Amino acid sequence: MRPTSLRSVPLSDLERSFGLRRVRGLAAGDPFVSGVSIDGAAVVQGDLYIGLPGARHHGAAFAGQAVEAGAVAILTDDDGMLLLERQIGVPVLVWSRPLRPLVGMIAASVYDTGSLGLPTFAVTGTNGKTSTTHFLEALLTGMGLVPGVSSTAERRIGSTVIPSKLTTPEAAELHAIVARMAELGARSLVIEVSAHALTRHRVDGFVFDVAAFTNLSHDHLDDYADMDAYLAAKIELFTSSRSRRAVVNLDTPAGATVVERSQVPVATIATAAEPGAVVDADWVVEIVEESLDHTAFTVRHREHGALNARVPVVGRHMAANGGLAIAMLVESGHSLEEIAGALGRDGLIEADLPARAVRIPAASGPAVFIDSGHSPDAFDKTLASLRRLARGRVIAVIGANGDRDTTKRADMGATAALGSDLVVVTDHHPRGEDPAAIRAAVIAGAKAARPDADVRDIADPSTAIRAAVGAAREGDVVVWMGLAGKDYRELDGTTVPFSVPGETTAALHEAGWH
């Protein structure tokens, strides 16, 4: 997704603006730059190709490929310069300091995203980012401020949608996406921001009008030394160079740390455990009604007043995310009256939440959900919500991903065992790991937490969901957590097409439920 109306910038302008050093003796000239890429395979005519150091290879090694694809100039660091062919054929610029922090600033200059003047919103946290992002999308759309959205699930502006590969795109791609969204009529911007996006400078070149923090729980300890380091990465969003205001959820202890260390004005929000309970936060979310199809709530502020709303999904945590989206809009300058006008029938936030607590349609049989949550906290919140509403048993189908944080696998199993009556452990994305070893770690955690738990090891996910649905009765709830949201599985270097909704629907029909 790139802008179609290309804005060309002389290479010499970038050279002067950012203090880049031109390598003399190679190709001369002052070509016009109309795009930026850090991926040699994604280069198009007119790009500045930036060769970055990587985990396995240095991007400069692919400079020749980039030039063949149309790159008009190369930017790299001192190590990358040593890898370049002497007859590269295009001008070469060098930056002797860490190069990645420069990518977003250069992309912003080339795509001119700083001049767009769009209201911008950012959401970070372990869980709830995508839901909050899409609640914001629905409300902004209802208010006439059609948003460009970048979430874990997709990049979207109106009917133009492309699937996401990363929660937050690399900076060069993100600025191009935003410029294209503006061309397509975006009047606001909502971006889901991961810890990796902040650590790896993917949102450089943006200053968000309102940034939000949802929560913090065990995840990504394969990339961060401990939970303190993981939180510190997220707190970077609340510095004055990245945001102007913030709304912080206090439902997890990390919220107080974010407030304490924030460099921008903060409004706090929290969920009342019981209606009418006293909560020390600027905004309070009170749960009014829960069902398997929606959750109703009231969000209240001592000065701005109160608003009754509903989200079309199960769970108090989802209501908290809906309340957070409303608070973000008010903190950006909108009134509760404006937001009320954007709600649908009976106060519904008419959001389409990709793979978030999605109920598979069936007129009879157990209630069956698919959900993309893949952390112990996500399991806990989803299972607790379903337990409160289920007339019968709760059956969970779970799996852990390979080549990712191994320290959370036992906790995922434990949470599932404690929150459900039957746990089916299956394979999701084993990637380069032994899938049997992954399942064994999850099962060990489940058995350690609850030795009498009914835990079944079924490697094939198609068979696993059929076993779960086949074991269910009318009034039971089945939830498949962790794999939804993708149309493939990653198996030892290969990508295999796979539909979680399709397999789940087939399992219901084969069990006789329609």
Image (cartoon, grey):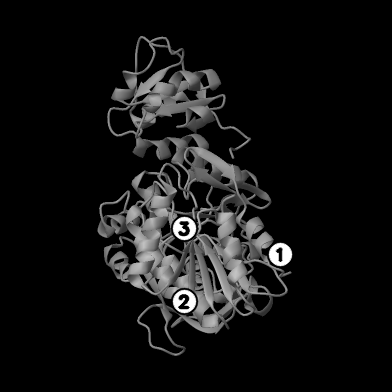
| Label 2: element kind | helix
Q: Which mark is residue 384?
A: 2
At x 62% / y 52%, what residue is drawn?
A: 499
Please determine whether, in this image, residue 353 is positioned above or below residue 288: above
Quadrant the N terminus occupies: top right
Q: Give the mark nearer the N terminus: 1 vs 3.
A: 3
Q: Give the mark nearer the N terminus: 1 vs 2.
A: 2
Please determine whether, in this image, residue 84 is positioned above or below residue 163: above
Q: Position of residue 308 (x, y in %)?
A: 57, 81
Q: Which residue is mark 1?
A: 509
Q: Position of residue 484 (x, y in %)?
A: 56, 57
Query: Label 1 vs label 2: CA separation?
Result: 27 Å
| Label 1: element kind | helix
- Residue 137 visible from this viewpoint: no
- Residue 414 visible from this viewpoint: yes
Which amino acid type corresponds to the residue marked 2 in the rendered image? Ala
At x 29% / y 34%, what residue is drawn?
A: 98
Which amino acid type corresponds to the residue marked 1 in the rendered image? His
Of residues 230 and 409, the one drawn nearer to the viewer in this rendering: 409
Mark 1 in CB contact with mark 3 (< 8 angstroms):
no
Q: Which mark is residue 282?
A: none
